Amino acid sequence: MAVEQVPDDVEAASGGDKTSSSNNPLSRKLNKLLEARLENDRETIEALRSLSEFFTENNIRTRRRLRGDLEKRSLAINEEFVQSFSDLKAAMSALSEDIAAMSAGCAGMVERLDAVKRDTRDLLARTGQLRAEARRLEGRQQAAQGFLAAFQPSAEQVALLRGTGGPVGRDQLDERFLDALAQSRRMHDHCKLLLRSSRAQAGLQLMESLAAQQEAAYERLYRWLQNRCRVLGSDTAAEPGPLLARAFGALRERTLLWGYALDEYANARRACVVRHLIDALTRGSGGTRPLESLAKDPLRYAGDMLAWAHQCAASERELLEQLLAQCGGLRGSGGEAALDHILAGLCSPLRLRLEQLAVGESSPLVLCRLRSVVRFYAATLGAGTALATCLDEVAALAHKMFLNSLTCHCTRLLDKAELPPGDLGAPPFLQQLLSLVRELLSTRDGSLAPVDQRQKDLPDILAQVLEPALAACEQLSSRLAPADRSVHLLNCLQLARTGLAVLEMTEPWLEELEARQKPHMDCLVEEQLEYFVSRLGGALDPSHGVLEPLMVQALSQGLAELCTQPDTWGALPPLALLVGRQRQQAVRRDALEALWHRYAQLYGRAEGLTTTPAALRQALLLPPLDQPQEEKA
């Protein structure tokens, strides 16, 4: 926009006296314009911007025409506004006419609707009544359908229960039949609620209908279970599936029929396991050789038969647990009796063969192991079952045959016994019998024999073997001298004690053997003492009265030699054959102790004895008298 220049006359006028021009209105306006801050006056800036659009030249001519140009421009703008509002007025007039026409049409329609309402008022009332009646009937229909769904099975379910139609025949059952039977039982329980209400008669009728359907269904279910159990009995690889287990659970509601079905299953499985056992014995199974081919090895033969029976028992238990999974399991449903009945079929063939092994075997060791194997499997199968009872009877027979065989074996060895060996050691038959005892008790100590049974077997074995052997040793040594006899028996008892010490639960017998050695040890002490007395000239013999000088002299010389060799002088010859250096020393020490006591008694009444009892005791290496007995030992 061109900057408007101030005219010269205005400048001249403004350059005059300010005081005189301050009262001039024109001057005041000019001064006001000059002093105004246009950068803050938006309206003035907009006006100047609009002015610059058409006021392009700033000269005196254009300035003089400025007012006219502004008025013309304002007039043109007003004419445009008038023209625009004229068009708007015409449009609004047309719109007003249309609205008036529409209002007239609506008024006519309202009049016609009022007339129609007056004519159809009765029809609308009837329609409302019919709708209310329809809603009431729908509610009654839903209630009736709910009642039927809760208290009466559908036609398809009735057909399934009776087996009169549908894709499932009379001899076949599936999950839908069991679902229908479970639904029927629930409905029967629901009908009991009707008996407590005003619908008792309807409840009785429904219960009678449901009871008849259930009886037919249970009868059909029982027949189906019979057929399925026979299939399980004929096929050894067959297993009861979920459907059969659920069927047994459903039949549990009829205890009598359920018991018959379980008996049918038990009979079928019993025949199956017996047939399977005979096949395993004679023809083999699973690519293995027949068990009877091992008859020459009694232990392996019996072990394989019993292992087969144990595996069969575990398999049958697992099958029964699957079958009775929905009946409370084996313990909660009486399945233990059924399992016992199934496994009882194995008793006869197993008893026959095991008894033949027990009767035909002569080795006590084999019979002992056979008895242990049978007892182990009897305990594993569980007490009280028919098969376990059968095995207990076989084990009792094997035990009886074992004792008989053991007695015969010991008798044969003892009959061959001769005089004791020259070294007074244990005879060969005692060593052989002790070796047999160790083998028998080692078998007994194995994991197959329970602890209580091992405690019961120990007295029988030792009574049959050890007691006769020790009695034979005593009889053979009866003709020997007392010292030789004691040494021989001590060697025998020590050998027996050593043989039993490595075995379990033999502590009472070890104590008894130790107690049996004491009389013989005392006998050796007495013999050693008498031997000392004889070597010392008999002066220490209590039967002598007054000692002669020669006897005192011989006693002094002998004691001098004894004091110089307290460990070897005057040793009893048979004592050297006693097994065990400690026992030899114990006999000599006790004999020296007794010798010292005799000398102490003699020292006070005999003359010529120069060695005091205290000096003699010290020379003999005996413990002081005030030393406790434990230290002396």
Image: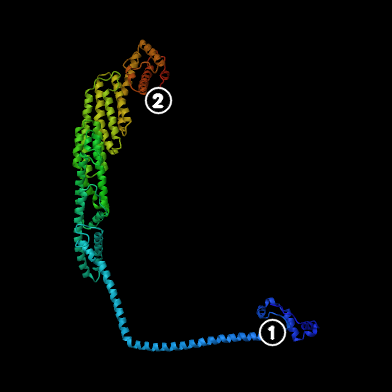
Q: Quadrant of residue 305?
A: top left
**Circle number at residue 629:** none
Mark 2, secondary structure of its residue: helix
Q: Secondary structure at mark 1?
A: helix
Decide which of 91, 258 is in the foreground and name it: 91
Give whichever of 598, 525 is nearer the camera.
Answer: 525
Q: Please state the horizontal and vertical placement of residue 393, each as a whole percent of the image.
A: 21, 39
What's the distance in space between the residues labelled 1 and 2, CA to CA? Answer: 158 Å
Read off the residue under disc 2: 632
Q: If the image is split into quadrants, where does the N terminus sit?
A: bottom right
Q: Nearer the viewer, residue 14 or 583?
A: 14
Q: Is residue 395 visible?
A: no
> Which amino acid, by three-letter code, is at mark 2?
Lys
Three-letter amino acid code of the residue under disc 1: Leu
Image coords of residue 437 (percent x, y): 28, 30
Q: Position of residue 217 (x, y in %)?
A: 20, 60
Graded by Cα atoms within 10 Å as few (under 14), some (14 to 19) or many (20 or more), the crowding at tag 1 reads some
Within 10 Å of the Cα at label 2, are there few (<14), some (14-19), or many (20+) other Cα atoms? few
User: In the image shown, does 152 or 467 lie closer to the viewer?
Assistant: 152
Residue sitting at 76 percent across and 86 percent down?
Answer: 24
Residue placed at 26% from the left, 67% from the top?
Answer: 149
Q: Position of residue 433 (x, y in %)?
A: 26, 27
Q: Is residue 458 visible?
A: yes
Outermost residue to the top: 550
Looking at this view, name the residue that lies furthest to the right: 17
Residue 268 lies left or right of residue 615; in this view the side is left
Q: Is residue 32 above or below residue 178?
A: below
For label 1, the residue is: 66
Pointer 1 and pointer 2: residues touching (CB < 8 Å)? no
Quadrant for residue 3, please give it.
bottom right
- The residue shown at (25%, 70%) is 197
